Image: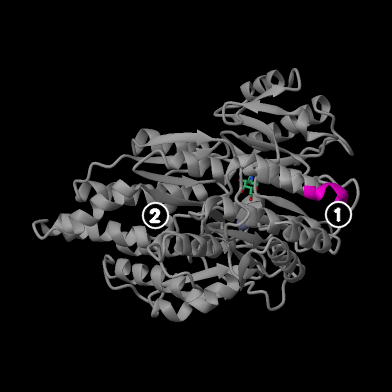
Amino acid sequence: MMAHFQDVSKQSSLHPKPAELVSQYGTAGFRANAKLLDHIMFRMGLLAALRSKKTKATIGVMVTASHNPEEDNGVKLIDPMGEMLLQTWESYATQLANAEQEDLLTALKDVIEKEAINMSQEANVFVGKDTRSSSSSLSQAVLDGVAALGGHSKDYGLVTTPQLHYMVRCQNTQGKYGEATVEGYYKKLCQAFIQLINNKASNCTDDQKHLSVDGANGIGALKVHEMESHLKKELLISLFNDGSKGKLNHQCGADFVKVQQKPPTGIEINPGERGCSFDGDADRIVYYYTDSDGRFHLLDGDKIATLISTFLKELLTQASLDLKIAVVQTAYANGSSTHYLENTMKVTVVCTKTGVKHLHHAAQEFDIGVYFEANGHGTVLFSEAAEEKIQQLAENPGTDDERKRAALLLQNTVNVINQTVGDAISDMLLIEAILAIKGMTIQQWDAMYTDLPNRQLKVKVSDRRVIDTTDAERRAVSPAGLQEAIDSLVKKYKQARSFVRPSGTEDVVRVYAEAEAQESTDALAHEVSLAVYRLAGGVGDEPKPLH
Ligand code: NG1
Ligand code: ZN
């Protein structure tokens, strides 16, 4: 045991912490300029080894900063079932990351003691990285950290975030979830996709099978390309922003498209054709098309959740299966989507705080939990009991044809979905299958409900922690007077709603507004930004009106 700590001391001096740097394990792990992350990576290697010893299972470490600019990087840990790291361990992550060089061993021993970790237990860690130029040396730092505690690691190299989550779950279920290889991932998803597509409404023309994909110049592009041969020409993909020339996430990718509400650069797409954008680590997806008047239409995470839950609900009815389905959203969900889900579709809707872990946990409370952030991160969770019921029905020789067809469709839907985390590739395959089965165009999908105009803005303040929120972040409890100010601004407009919260991934306060018309939405977003600037310690220039 002492030998381990000697190794840690020796190795950690090769990954020194810049003095006085303070970092926090936020909404999606650590994220910062890549130059500030080497020590954190090493220490997350250490922490992953400890987490593995504690859980007696394989743990994942993904090196990525998702939709952030190329210069940034980040790291997140993956728990045994492919889920986000347990919340109590997030504070250990923060403690380890912030320990000054000479205090690292004390911080490490503190975790070991608090968690009563048996240090003679084996440790196994899977490591993956995105395509950022900094990712190679940073993932090496993670591997060094695992090795310093005598842990074993497997380096998956370039993979999407959800692929690494999938690997971890496969490994810890002894292959029950699938084979823990990239090939195994394509096989599982594509087989299910092909089986689903066999139920399509009519013979699809090549036009209907065609989809333009914006790979955000990131890892998703490489992986879509790798997967193509498994699709047996049932989906014809034109890949744009594949990383061969453009910069990662620059003027492209899911975050750009969602926030700017316009198509990415570098994509060619005719009016009416379907396009979609991944983010930098391929755990988010949004769809879009341009109509014959040249108007851009975005189908975000809310539209995706609506399409998927409608499909599942229809199948449950056809299969006469009594399973409780719910949709989990955040405050960023468009008000129209919530209204449609509750009043037209009559499904339960739950609102949680921003951050996938919150949505994931809420979704686990139901037989079938569909969760999506408006930005396109989401998936579907099936309880074990739900999966069993579906399987029994599919395999029961007494089941009549209609029920059997629905049960088989449900079974293949379960298999095409990555239940560990939101997955752009898996979501794309499911959406394409649903559209084909229902014989639905993207315009028809878009017409399920009409989004309220909405706007997201950022305000810089000197310390964003002065803003505290409640009610799933829909109301601010501090600083004094801010919520009252927002309330009176909202009252000025029809169908209006607005809220503010400190970002967990950027040093800004986010402002969200929606209202009856785009102009009033933009005015409201601006007025609320001003209120934040004035009441929460804004820095730099005062926010300017949008028009
Ligand atoms: P923050 O920066 O906390 O708003 C953003 C997204 C989250 C989530 C995380 C992690 C919005 C408004 N926020 O968090 O939904 O995806 O990044 O990537 O989209
Ligand atoms: Zn991402």
Asked if 271 appears above or below 31 in the picture, the reply is: below
Is residue 249 located in the magenta-colored stretch of the structure?
A: no
Residue 314 in the image: state x and y as whole percent: 27, 49
Question: In terms of depth relative to the viewer, which is nearer, 42 or 279?
Answer: 42
**What residue sits 76% from the left and 57% below the top?**
5
Q: Is residue 398 left or right of residue 210?
A: left
- Going from N to C along the chain, the mark reached first, 2 or 1, is 1
**Mark 2: which amino acid?**
Gln
CB of mark 2 near ligand 1 (< 8 Å): no
Instruction: Single out the mark in the foreground, 2 or 1.
Output: 1
Residue 376 in the image: state x and y as whole percent: 54, 52
- Identify the mark at residue 444; answer none if there is no mark: 2
| Label 1: which secondary element | loop
Q: Residues within 10 Å of mark 2 (few under 14, many from 20)?
A: few
Ligand 2 is in which quadrant of the figure? bottom right
- Identify the mark at residue 17; answer none if there is no mark: 1
Residue 540 figure quarter: top right
Residue 240 in the image: state x and y as whole percent: 60, 73
Residue 119 figure quarter: bottom right
Q: Is residue 203 left or right of residue 8?
A: left
Which portion, as a residue range, is magenta?
Answer: 100-105
**Mark 1: which amino acid?**
Lys
Question: In terms of depth relative to the viewer, which is nearer, 8 or 175?
Answer: 8
